[in-house]
């Protein structure tokens, strides 16, 4: 969060020379930004991303297990060719 906040410094500091050349891209709401207002969103997004990471990771493991069903990796080695190889890649 602190890293992301530090990267918004160019938007928060008003530079009339820069903003005068590009008035359509001027941030007029940056004066209303406060660091404490970003923390609830950061926590909410972290939990959402953590849950999505778990769900996607679990579904990927299940998908790969289904694709490699009935293949003995110790005996046959890695999958070398065929439809399974293309689907895994």
Image (cartoon, rainbow, N blue to C red):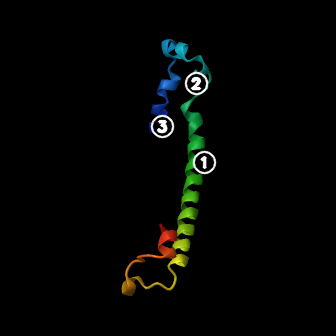
* Residue 63 in picture, x, y percent from top left: 55, 72
Q: Residues within 10 Å of mark 2 (few under 14, many from 20)?
A: some
Corner quadrant of residue 74: bottom left
Q: Which residue is mark 2?
A: 30
Residue 27 higher or lower than 81, as above or below: above
Q: Give the CA distance from mark 2 to mark 1.
A: 22 Å
Q: Position of residue 20 (x, y in %)?
A: 54, 13
Residue at 52% x, 25% y: name it.
11
Secondary element at image label 1: helix
Question: Of the numbered discs in the image, which one, if any, rests on residue 20?
Answer: none
Position of 77 compared to 84: left or right?
left
Q: CA distance from mark 1 to mark 3?
A: 15 Å
Q: Residue under label 1, please give it.
A: 44
Q: Tag 3's secondary structure? A: helix
* Foreground pick, 55 / 38: 55
Compared with 82, 51 (above or below) is: above
Of the two numbered discs 2 and 1 in the rendering, the one whose residue sits closer to the viewer: 2
Asked if marks 1 and 3 touch (Cβ < 8 Å), the reply is no
Q: Secondary structure at mark 2?
A: helix
Mark linked to residue 4:
3
Q: Residue at x 48, y 25 (%)?
A: 10
Mark 1, residues whose alpha carbon is within 10 Å: few (<14), some, or many (≥20)? few
**Residue at left offset 42%, top offset 77%:** 79
Q: Position of residue 17 (x, y in %)?
A: 49, 12
Residue at 49% across, 34% down: 5
Disc nearer the start of the sequence (2/1):
2
């Amino acid at each position: 969060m602190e890293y992301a906040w530090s990267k918004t410094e160019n938007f928060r500091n008003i530079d009339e020379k820069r903003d005068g050349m590009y008035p359509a891209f001027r941030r007029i709401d940056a004066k209303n930004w406060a660091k404490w207002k970003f923390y609830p969103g950061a926590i909410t997004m972290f939990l959402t991303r953590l849950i999505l990471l778990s769900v996607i990771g679990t579904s990927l493991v299940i998908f790969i297990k289904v694709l490699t069903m009935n293949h003995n990796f110790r005996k046959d080695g890695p999958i070398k060719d065929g439809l399974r190889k293309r689907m895994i890649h």
